[in-house]
Image: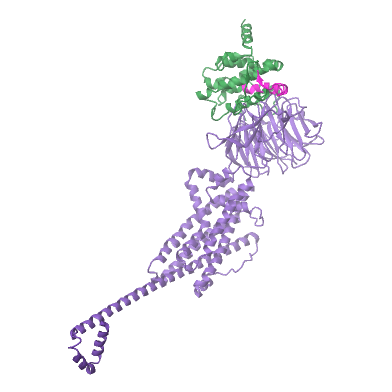
Amino acid sequence: MDEASSQNQLGGSANPAGVANRQNLEEPSQRIQYSIPGILHFIQHEWARFEMERSQWELERAELQAKIAFLNGERKGQENLKNDLVRRIKMLEYALKQERAKYHKLKYGTDLVQGDMNPPVEEGGEEVRVDPDAILSTNTNVSWKQSRHLLRQYLQEIGYTDTIIDLRSNRVRSLLGIDGGGNEENHNSTPAMNGSDTTKRMPDANRWNVTKKTPSCLEAQIQDAERAVIDNFEFLRSEGEDAEGMEMDDDDEDDEPEEEDDVHRLKSPKVPKVALDVDDVDGESVDLDPDFRFLPDVEDSSPGVLGFGPGSRRVYGPGGEEDALEGLGELAQLTVTNEADATYDQISSTKENFRKTWTAKYTLRSHFDGVRALCFHPQEPTLITASEDATLKLWNLQKTVPAKKSASLDVEPVYTFRGHLGPVLCLAMSGDGDKCYSGGIDGTIRIWNIPSSNIDPYDSYDPCVVGGSLPGHTDAVWGLTYHGQRQHLLSCAADSTVRLWSTDARSPLLYTYAVEKDGIPTSVDFVYESSNQFVCSFNTANCVIFDLETGKPVTRLDTETEQGSSSISRQINRVVSHPTLPLTITGHEDRHIRFWDNNSGRLVQSMVAHLDSVTSLAVDPNGLYLLSGSHDCSIRLWQLDSKQCVQEITAHRKKFDESIFDVAFHPSKPFIASAGADALAKVFV
Amino acid sequence: MADQNVVLRRNRPGTKAENFYRWCDEAYEEMDSTLVVQQYIQQTIRLDHNNIDTILNAPETQDEGVWKYEHLRQFCMELNGLAVRLQGECQPSTCTQMTATEQWIFLCAAHKTPKECPAIDYTRHTLDGAACLLNSNKYFPSRVSIKESSVAKLGSVCRRVYRIFSHAYFHHRQIFDEFESETTLCRRFTVFVTKYNLMSRDNLIVPILEDESAGQGESEA
């Protein structure tokens, strides 16, 4: 109603000439309430309303436009960032390639055949410019993958040195010294990159007024990136030089899992702990485990990068960047943790130096008097000790008693062998670990059938364990050694004879070697490098290699030329033969360990090895390390190629002037053990 | 290299059985190792195993707990010789229970619930158990000082170990006599537990103290 009338009025106002009269006529009768001023007022009012609405809309439009502008700006900022990152990736990649080529050339003298070696900067930039949104994602994915792959390869190569520690630990020690420097450098450069790139630039991009980003700002960014790349480049260069310093063998695939583990080990602060905890499992599997954990980690992170759409603002930049740094950053981070943690410092530093630091884990207490000898089972984590208390005890390292101090575990023996009527002096175990032979001061060699290591120590007596004896010697038996392949046993005694026994024949004694003209034998060992020889040391400091068949001396080790003290103080307490090399090692009363060439009989090296007489020697199954025990209460681990002491452990206390009687390596597991005059045996892992 | 005047008490490899531990004695005061007491006891035993009074006579400054402990270790160690001899003769079929006189059957305490082990098993288990207890890091973490509560444990070890003597005496007399003549161990043990009041006299059923007093009378006369 109202509207219709207003239209009429409007129409009226539009044609005032024609209609006005009629209006005027009708007005008094029908529409008295409308007056001209009223209508005008109404029209004015309406107009003002429309005007206001229009201005509101315009305001809204302006706001939206502003928003569009802002979003546009933001997008531009993101694009800039992307371009920059791509550029950096390309530069890194290029630098890596160059480094690799250089290194390859230096090492092999030939050019490394690689894909495109062109500086990628322009090309990368163009690509991005052509179609930033479409290409960027794939492009970065590829380059990420590539650079990641390269990075991993580098880490592997660095890690490789770690395996070489096993073989060449001397070189490795110096190497790791440099490596540490590399880490340091890396550690320094990483924060720089973080500082210039992520922390500074990212907030830039996140600010509202990105639209205003100027060319100069862009330039600064590029410079930043370049600086970062150069930083990185320096780091890589130093790593590359490290790699040059070591011998690498890229072909050796078998070793790779272990290497990577080593990389991980260097980097991860928790690994030393892991290594300690799981060492009673087989060494190899322990090594592999962390490695597999490491690899999936890397793989996990890369899909994260691949999955980013070009538009996902926050994740793309920093996420990728962090990822890129992860591999490197972790290294640096971990160095820091190691430095910070004082208790770890010791462990990690020794770890870096020697790869493995032995720590006392099991204390074997149950003997009443000095433990004269010990020997490990060939496969199982068990060992047998022989003591002056006339007993032998079988120990299962998996059956431990919780000890007061968590550091070391007490083990109780699972079986006590009774048979000797006086101190037991020496011990040998058969190759299959079924039998054990012990020589006593009573001149007997006893054979024992080793019971199961899971036997109840308080089970009833089984006479089968006592497997008889090997009669022959007439005085204290001081040395026993078993040859696994030949299944022969060699013994030496204070009656100045060395005897060869067959362990399965009815008449066990195969040969008696009368050696009295050289003195009283103190220790014997088979010469493993030559099939039918044995070496015998004497209390006169003589040491002779004999032929097993004829009993004739083959080589007389040139002990006479050694100047100095009387022969009694130079007495050889222990002789061991290297498992693979024609090398004989003797431990002397005069504190020396001497190395001899089996063929010439010449002294290879002589060194003062302990503060007191050297009583026992053991070579690890691979022939890389030598373990020595001494009456100075310590055992020492030596590197055989460099003859350097890599670890010393004070292990036992003195009784009278004696301290350590025997040391041993487990033939197949990472255990070493020492036997002491203090009635204890200790096992180290 | 080594000072020639310094005696190094060592059984070097190659030492003949007769020379084993044969070195000039060291005065108790000069021993400086942590195993002084064991060294001293073994030295006096080697000197003359029949001279029980000297063997059991503690040096003045010696802590009595440690002295008793080290002696008991030595007893258990030497008892191994008796166990080895019994191993050959004392069969589970003949000595089905650990008995001495008809009065008691001894139950083996090495098991969760004490049980009637054959005599040879009782012997082995008791010695093994004693070895574990006396070497226990919990009760005897140190051989230099021993807690009172741990010293109290020595009595029960003595009581159980003594049954090996009594079984041998009543059932394997020949072995016992041979062993005793070589070591005088039972007599020394009897004097030891009496002197330090580790066992009641009623339990000392091997009639050796009469011998002992008679022997003493003879030597003094």
| Residue A150 position within the rendered picture, expressed as x and y whole percent measured from the top left | 58, 61
> Magenta span covers which residues?
B75-99
User: What residue is drawn where x is 45% and y is 68%?
Assistant: A78
**Residue toward you, A619 or A545:** A619
State the hue of chain B.
green
| Residue A121 position within the rendered picture, expressed as x and y whole percent measured from the top left | 52, 70
For the C terminus of chain A, the image quarter is: top right
Which quarter of the picture shows residue A664?
top right
> Which chain is the one coloured purple?
A
Which quarter of the picture shows residue A645?
top right
| Residue A356 position within the rendered picture, expressed as x and y whole percent measured from the top left | 59, 44
Q: How many numbered marks are there?
A: 0
Q: Is residue B76 magenta?
A: yes
Q: Is residue A44 magenta?
A: no
User: What residue is drawn where x is 57% and y is 70%?
Assistant: A118
Tell whether A600 sits left or right of B200.
right
For the N terminus of chain A, the image quarter is: bottom left
Which quarter of the picture shows residue A595?
top right
Q: Main secondary structure of the magenta part?
A: helix
**Residue toward you, B33 or B112:** B112
Q: Which color scheme is applied?
A: by chain
Q: Residue furthest top?
A: B221
Q: Is residue A36 above or below residue A350?
A: below
**Residue toward you, A33 or A433:** A33
